[in-house]
Amino acid sequence: MPEMPEVEALAGFLGERLVGHAVASARVAAIAALKTFDPPLHAIEGRPIIAVRRHGKFLDLGIGGADAADGGPAGEALHLVFHLARAGWLRWYDVLPATVVRPGRSPIALRVRLDDGSGFDLTEAGTKKSLAVYVVRDPGDVPGVARLGPDPMADDFTLERFAAVLEGRRTRIKGLLRDQSVLAGIGNAYSDEILHAAKMSPYKIAATLDEAEVDRLYAAMRGTLGEALAEASGKPAAELKDAKRRRLRVHGRTGEACPVCGDTIRQVEFHDSTFQYCPTCQTGGTPLADRVLSRLVK
């Protein structure tokens, strides 16, 4: 799943290629992916793209206002917002294929063509489809955007604000880092990486962290995400997923040696996800039981 660093890099990549161009056509191939109907998808056609922004893991294409001749209020701006979910990605074309996308016959969920013939597809692999596309008048009209917590890499997200977020929360720190209503943009992979860098058990309860642990976790979060953002910046969309996999130290590396201590990286599997950790670095050498009701290791 693309997370903050990859989505931020995608925003930069698309901003360089989309802004100033008009949407020639927008076609949805996976009907379930389109979550809104007013305004309709075709309302963005013929309009210029004026900005590309990120909100957590959501990408937001700002679409310029309509002319009165379009049938809508003059000056009304729109937003094409999408979330790539677990198995989604963006495929860019300098020259978009002329083939017609047909519902149910390809992994393509949405195809957007620009006025110069370039464009992109949103694709999703697998059978469990959760990629989501919205056409809205304001990004806050998207429920997932409206509930986002603060961006952990924002200049004003200080150590003091982070400590206030953790205070009183009787929640495992792994789940809290992934909760988009608490912190926007961190997912399963980077939460593993942050906790490994902080030398902290995924099952540590947020409210029990002492001042030194909060400091360590904040530094690990900002450092891990900062490095990932720097490394992803400027890369083309086609390279971002592989670049992410290469730099991960524990996530997705079950059975490999920890790059810090050499212990074997372990995995905990739940009904819909897994996470990885190093026992020596994070849990005092004690492996976590690989089941949903694992005993807490503090």
Image: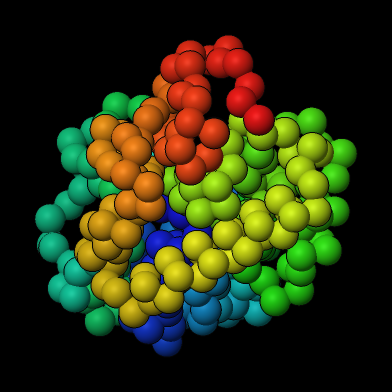
Quarter of the figure with the C terminus: top right
Residue 263, quarter of the rendered image: top left
Q: Residue at x 80, y 53 (%)?
A: 211
Colouring of the image: rainbow
The image quadrant of residue 234 is: bottom left
Task: Residue at 17%, 52% (x, y): give it.
Answer: 100
Horizontal and vertical percent for residue 136? 61, 57
Residue 185 in sight in this render: yes
Residue 77, above or below 265: below
- Of 151 and 212, nearer the camera is 212
The image shows residue 161 at horizontal and vertical percentages of 81, 61
Q: Position of residue 58 (x, y in %)?
A: 53, 56
As drawn, is 212 to the left or to the right of 19? Answer: right
- Residue at the location (81% across, 38% down)? 207
Vertical position of residue 114 compared to residue 249: above or below:
below
Quarter holding residue 216:
bottom right
